[in-house]
Amino acid sequence: MVDYASLAWDLAKDGVAIVTRGLEYNGTRESLEATVNDLSPVVERIEDSLTRLDLPIQLKHVQKLKKLLAKNAEAIGKHKIHWWNCVLAPWYQQKLEKEAADLERFASAQTQIHMFHLLTKILSVLSSKGPPSLGRRTNYAYRFADPLDERFPKFTVGLDGDSMQELRKNLLTGKEQVINLYGMPGSGKTTMAQKLCRDPQVQGKFKKNIFFETLGSQIEVEEAVKKLRDHELPKYGENPVLLVLDDVWPRTEDIVEMMSLKHKDSRILVTSRTEMKAAGSRHLMKLLSDKDAEKLLRHFLQSGDIDFDDQATSEILLQVLEGCKGLPLAIEFIGRKLRRKGSVQAVREVQLEWSRGHSILDSHEDLLTRLQNSVDESHRDYFMDLGLFPEDQKIPITVLIDMWIELHHPNEPASLPAMAITQELVAMNLAADIKVRRIVGREDLDDYYNNYFLEQHDLFRELAIHMSKQEPLENRERLIIDMFGSQNHPPEWWPKQQQSVVAPKILSISTDQNITPHWCSIQAAKTVVLVLNIFKTAEYTLPEFIKEMENLKVLIVTNNGACKTDLRNLELLGSLLSLKRIRLQQVSIPSLRDLKNVHKLSLYMCDVKKAFENSSIDFSEAMPKLVELSIEYCKDLVELPTGFCKMVTMKNLTISSCHDFVRLHEEIGKLENLELLRINYCANFEEMPESISELQSLTSLDISYCPSLRKLPVNIGKMQNLAKLYMAGCPIRELPDSMMDFNKLERVICDEYASPLWEVIISRFSSRPNINVADMDVSLNWLC
């Protein structure tokens, strides 16, 4: 007989247990969800670190833990209780308990063992490297005895070319003791040096006497000297020694001169970001070729589920590589990230993100940090200014000089401080310099840098922009607005709730033909420098907000297209009383008026005929305070505008590569304060007026490469303060007798035909000037 009472009691107990388990559901779910949320980011960071350390065994275990966390997260999402399925709470509770138990068991036992293994592994690596320093990266010194040293990457590309052969030759048979391998950060200098130390021939020559010392940015000279003395290098005097000084910064370069290795066959190999002038042999570390870059990326992706033979996938990978710009460090960072995800979809996402204007720096904090550390604190502002200009465009050094004089050196003489800064940026491989024209014997004379330009590696331009954006919008020193191809839509970062943006001290705007003058509203009363970059547009209207820029001192308008752009709305500049410097490039200028306080006007590759010849405006009235005028590559310039010779404030006048320019006005002698007159590379300039002899303040006269100029003014010798005369490339076969009246002439540059004429003249000088015979312009691009 069935005991219904007992059965009912048992059912009641089971029911209570089920209900109790159901009531426990919320607590279990919340606890497990908190655990997953807390652990997931930590596991991500551990995975990233293990990938960089190249520890595959530990990485495999952490990836298992990551999958288990993902499984728990899936269970939390799947087993949710709603009003229609509340009766399932006990069963969902059981499922979550099982997942939690599995996670706890895996983490408490296996993970602790593997973490202990990882710790011992890291400690063994650190003990072989020595104690860490406070520098940018771990500083260490060691002797290269073990060719399987763990610091050397197991896979390398691009290290067996001409540079490696030349470096090996210098180490083995060269005569120079100090060898310098320099290049931008992340380009592979350290890896190249390490590979040289493992070369069988190098090891055969130096035996075990190979020392590798990483210095870094934070170490002081005294500390570095002490570290090197600890090696007791003099005791190896009977045998050749190879000393590698890795990552030497400019302020510790002196250490190289302090080192004296007795053996004549000893060598010091220095890797640095700047070229060391003291080194006897210097080698630039080149970036990877497209082929080697692809090999390196494939290496980092080989463990992922990616079909390299698929054409569509291959094309996407090439687009990703293009964003890395051939820099091994960037390829390594993106490769390791994509290997962790291990799917074509992940590669597509990166490619799509970069195609929208994002950069590799936006998603790789470690890479950003490494590159930022390559920029010295004292040069950061100047480096970030390079990001104001478009990608793949040459940056005129004169533009940087104009900016930096007004921003940082308003009281400094001429352009010397600004030019020194550009040279330092180039020396640190943060930019490359280009000279479009070179004349032997007269580089950098008279602060003439109009033919000098900077180029910047695309990744470093992105770094400059990224660094400029790190402060909140309202606190930035620079605002860079790229509207190229945006169809009048403001950038993604543009504030949604306000109509206008307050611009900082430096403002750069890039636009094309799709942008109207009223695309946005900007309050720019504080702006000192305005850079306008124009692309692919037949006409460009200056934006209305310019008239409110009461503190604007420098205006730079550059058309980067193939054809000239008509520049409109120039009358807005008449209200800007602080405006001192204007540079216009490849634009057509309708008129120039009411620029009452402008001190310097630079016109480069512009159409000036309308402004100069067809205008009824007196130039001296339009710009009464003009001190410097530079007109270059303006093909339609025939003569200077009306009223120009009444500009008594004028000190520097340059007319260069204007082939239709024929003559100077006879009234040129009225420019009583003119100190420098430069008319060079003007194919049809044929006569100097006699009144030029009245320019008593003139100290420098440059008439180089004017092939139609066949004689000089008879009374040119009356210019009593003339110190420099450049006349190379002019077919002048007779010198006026008045030249013997020069009292202060110090230097003459002429060609070989005029040199004998000058020898006769200077034989009568009480103080012999320096005569240089210049080679013809090696580029000859002035004829274009």
Image (tube, helix red, strand yellow):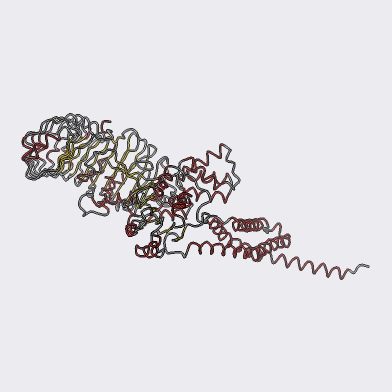
Percent position (x, y) of residue 283? 37, 47
218 versus 167 height, above or below: below
Point out residue 212 in the picture as x, y percentages from the top left corner. 43, 57
Q: Nearer the viewer, residue 267 or 194?
A: 267
Height in image: 134 above or below 595? Answer: below
Q: Residue sitting at 32 percent across and 57 percent down?
A: 257
Q: Classify residue 32 as left or right of residue 590.
A: right
Q: Residue at x 38, y 59 (%)?
A: 237
Q: Quadrant of the N terminus?
A: bottom right
Q: Quadrant of residue 90?
A: bottom right
Instruction: Out of 3 and 530, give the one closest to the viewer.
Output: 530
Q: Position of residue 22 (x, y in %)?
A: 71, 64
The percent coordinates of residue 56 (x first, y second) are 59, 55
Q: What residue occupies the far front of the structure in this picture?
A: 238
Q: Please state if 330 lies on the left or on the right of 114 as rendered.
A: left
Residue sitting nearer the eye, 249 or 343: 249
* Residue 762, quarter of picture: top left
Does residue 299 appear in the picture of this structure? Answer: yes
Between 571 and 689, the residue placed more toward the observer is 689
Q: Quadrant of the C terminus?
A: top left
